[in-house]
Image: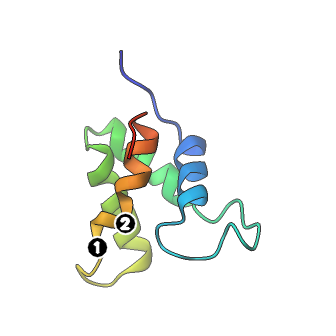
Amino acid sequence: MSIVLKAEMISRALFEFDPMNTCCKENDCFDEYDRIGEGVEGRLRQGFSLKQALVLELAESFFDDDSLHTDCLDQVVAYLEGKDY
């Protein structure tokens, strides 16, 4: 059985873990990652892995080059996949 991830779930996980350190949780910016969640959901439907989709969407929004360190996403991926981190 596989889990179907929706944009709202992805956005909420990103809000909770805030891998880009936007301080969204501290500032109650609940919609900080909504656009990212939508993009990730779309990429998942295209066949990308969860981590690939997160990396691509976050890199487009936060970076001009390949400077995204993907280890900051490990907790988010584990959480969304229902695994312990």
Instruction: Tell me what residue is drawn at x 51 percent, y 52 percent.
Output: 37
Work out whether 26 lies above or below 42.
below
In the image, taking residue 24 as reference, residue 10 lies left or right, namely left
Name of the residue lying farthest toward the front: 84
Dot 2 crowding, Cα within 10 Å, few <14, some 14–19, many 20+? some
Name of the residue lying farthest toward the bottom: 64
Instruction: Tell me what residue is drawn at x 38 percent, y 36 percent.
Output: 83
Q: Position of residue 65 (x, y in %)?
A: 26, 83
Q: From where the camera sits, is residue 46 visible?
A: yes
Q: What is the quadrant of residue 79 in the picture?
A: top left
Residue type at mark 2 is Cys
Q: Position of residue 49 (x, y in %)?
A: 26, 43
Q: What is the quadrant of residue 28 in the picture?
A: bottom right
* Circle 1: element type: loop
Q: Which mark is residue 44?
A: none
Count every numbered label the image shows and give the total: 2
Q: Quadrant of the N terminus?
A: top left
In the image, taking residue 39 as reference, residue 18 lies left or right, namely right
Q: Which residue is mark 2?
A: 72
* Circle 2: element type: helix
Instruction: Tell me what residue is drawn at x 44 percent, y 53 percent.
Output: 39
Work out whether 28 lies above or below 79.
below
Residue type at mark 1 is His
In the image, taking residue 44 as reference, residue 39 lies left or right, namely right
Q: Which residue is mark 1?
A: 69
Q: What is the quadrant of residue 80 in the picture?
A: top left
Work out whether 49 lies above or below 18.
above
The chosen color scheme is rainbow
For the residues labelled 2 and 1, say whether their Cβ atoms are less than 8 Å apart.
yes
